[in-house]
């Protein structure tokens, strides 16, 4: 099979157009690669990170590629900032979130904080899609 045909088949199988995604920690490393991949497959992606400059730079890159990616500055270990993020995402995506990917640098945060954070984000996400 030619690489062009393979690419078309892959695109059909993984067509994410009209799907919405929230990827936390999308400005660096694996989170950045995940945003890239989801957006390349057509998903509308929102991401967040704590560093405003890196977030702006990433959003600029994605815009140049024609990807639909928005972003917020948010420290997801903060209850208040997390709730604010979910309100923004809910409003942006009209209450419809299909994909939630939580990426963080675990070395920065205590395991108990990470566990609580993931549980809470999942609860909010489930509430949003129901
Ligand atoms: N890299 C690998 O090869 C690899 C392999 C296996 C598993 N992992 C795991 O994958 C996860 C990500 O690793 P990585 O290497 O991609 O990390 P990274 O390059 O340090 O990127 C972490 C991302 O999360 C953001 N972030 C960190 N803390 C945050 C917070 N409290 N609120 C919001 N955003 C936050 C960072 O931006 P700001 O700093 O601006 O907030 C950045 O965008 C880690 O849990 C790691 O253990 C990584």
Image: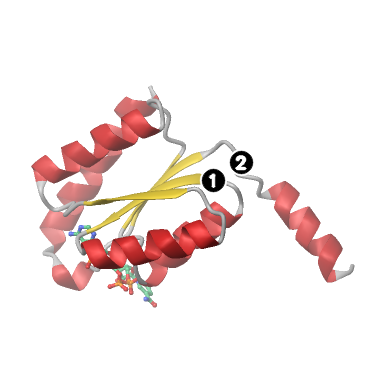
Corner quadrant of residue 94:
top left
Q: Residues within 10 Å of mark 2 (few under 14, many from 20)?
A: few
Ligand 1 lies in which image quarter?
bottom left
Q: Real-space Cα distance between discs 1 and 2? A: 5 Å
Say if residue 123 shows up in the picture: no
Sequence-wise, the earlier of marks 1 and 2 is 2
Say if residue 37 shows up in the picture: yes
* Residue behind label 1 places its C-beta within 8 angstroms of ligand 1: no
Q: Which residue is tagged 2?
A: 17
Q: Tag 2, which secondary structure?
A: loop
Give the residue displayed 83% in from the left and 65% down from the top.
Answer: 4
Q: Answer yes or no: do the residues labelled 1 and 2 have beta carbons within 8 Å?
A: yes
Percent position of residue 101, x then y: 38, 51
77 relative to 5 in the view: left or right: left
Q: Which mark is residue 43?
A: 1
Q: Residue furthest right?
A: 1
- Which corner quadrant holds the C terminus? top left
């Amino acid at each position: 099979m030619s690489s062009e045909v393979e690419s078309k088949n892959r695109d059909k199988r993984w067509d994410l157009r009209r799907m919405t995604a929230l990827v936390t920690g999308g400005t660096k490393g694996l989170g950045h690669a995940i945003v890239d991949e989801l957006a390349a497959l057509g998903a509308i992606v929102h991401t967040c990170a704590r560093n405003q400059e890196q977030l702006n730079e990433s959003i600029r890159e994605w815009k140049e590629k024609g990807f639909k990616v928005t972003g917020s500055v948010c420290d997801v270990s903060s209850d208040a900032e997390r709730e604010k993020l979910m309100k923004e995402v809910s409003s942006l995506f009209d209450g419809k979130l299909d994909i939630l990917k939580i990426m963080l640098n675990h070395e920065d945060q205590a395991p108990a904080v990470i566990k609580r954070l993931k549980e809470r984000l999942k609860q909010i996400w489930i509430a949003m899609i129901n």
